[in-house]
Amino acid sequence: MRILFIWIAIVLALPAYGSQRCFDDRFCLSTEPDGSRATLLVENVSGLPVVLSLYAPQLVGKPHVTVDLRASEQRLLGSVRNVRRFWQDMRVRWTPGTLAAVHNDDIRYAPPLQPVSHYPVIQGFNGNYSHQGASRYTIDFDAPEGTPVLAARGGIVIDTKADGQLGGPSKSLAKHANYVAILHDDGTTGEYYHLRFDGVAVSRGDTVKTGQLIGYTGNTGFSSQPHLHFGVYIAKPHGRYDSVPVSFNTELSMP
């Protein structure tokens, strides 16, 4: 189950004019006085692409705005009235990645667990247990905890989580899943879930090659048994996402 790229930020502080708020070391929002209103700006501070949707009743002329930040840049989001209330009411959802990327279907992925014959697929595309909807084109590989996970395709590490310690067959545990997400050169992201506690071997911003060690399997998050969940995703507005079908450079092992 994919939980990585749906972030919701609730701002409880009440900053005044000229204030700034940063999120997850990715982007910073700021307001600058402009007569009776304020100009709302966003700056990408990580250098990694992110799709941001912001909601606030104080936005002038629109209830929300989405921006595709692809580099270290500052962008205008619009104008706001009643800045103090804006900081109280605003909400943001963001997904690391590139908006509406187009997957390169010529790519053949390397299986992330090797040798392939040791790690059979226990749930594939359109799996009844959890591979439906936006995650319909994802794959679960059976693997004991601690199995090395290799990058199925090279790219830049765009996000990681390694501090989750809980796991089990309940969606309420999804937030505890540890993972690695890698940005590909076509703007899609390869995502590897349910890694063990402290089981991430790379850091955000690292460049990795196909076959490189990126972590170790586990049983964290919404997981009924130790395994690796792998999928390739496209970022969409409003914290949404969609998986895409992929092909491998060798036949996968089936149970």
Image (spheres, rainbow, N blue to C red):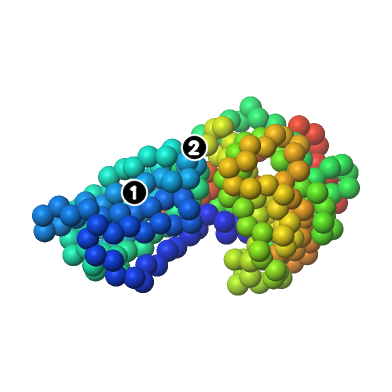
Query: Marks 1/2: CA distance?
Result: 21 Å
Q: Looking at the picture, which amino acid does disc 1 mark?
A: Val
Please give the residue where the numbered disc 2 appears in the rendered image. 101
Circle 2: is it few (<14), some (14-19), or many (20+) Cα within 10 Å?
A: some
Q: Residue at x 55, y 52 (%)?
A: 134
Please give the residue where the numbered disc 1 appears in the rendered image. 42
Circle 1: is it few (<14), some (14-19), or many (20+) Cα within 10 Å?
A: many
Q: Residue at x 26, y 52 (%)?
A: 40
Count of marks placed on residues: 2
Q: Looking at the picture, which amino acid does disc 2 mark?
A: Ala
Q: Residue at x 46, y 50 (%)?
A: 26
Front of the two marks 1 and 2: 1
Q: Quadrant of residue 168?
A: bottom right
47 relative position to 3: left or right? left
Residue 190 point in image, percent of width and height: 63, 43
Tell me the tag on residue 14. none
57 relative position to 67: left or right? left
113 relative position to 129: left or right? right
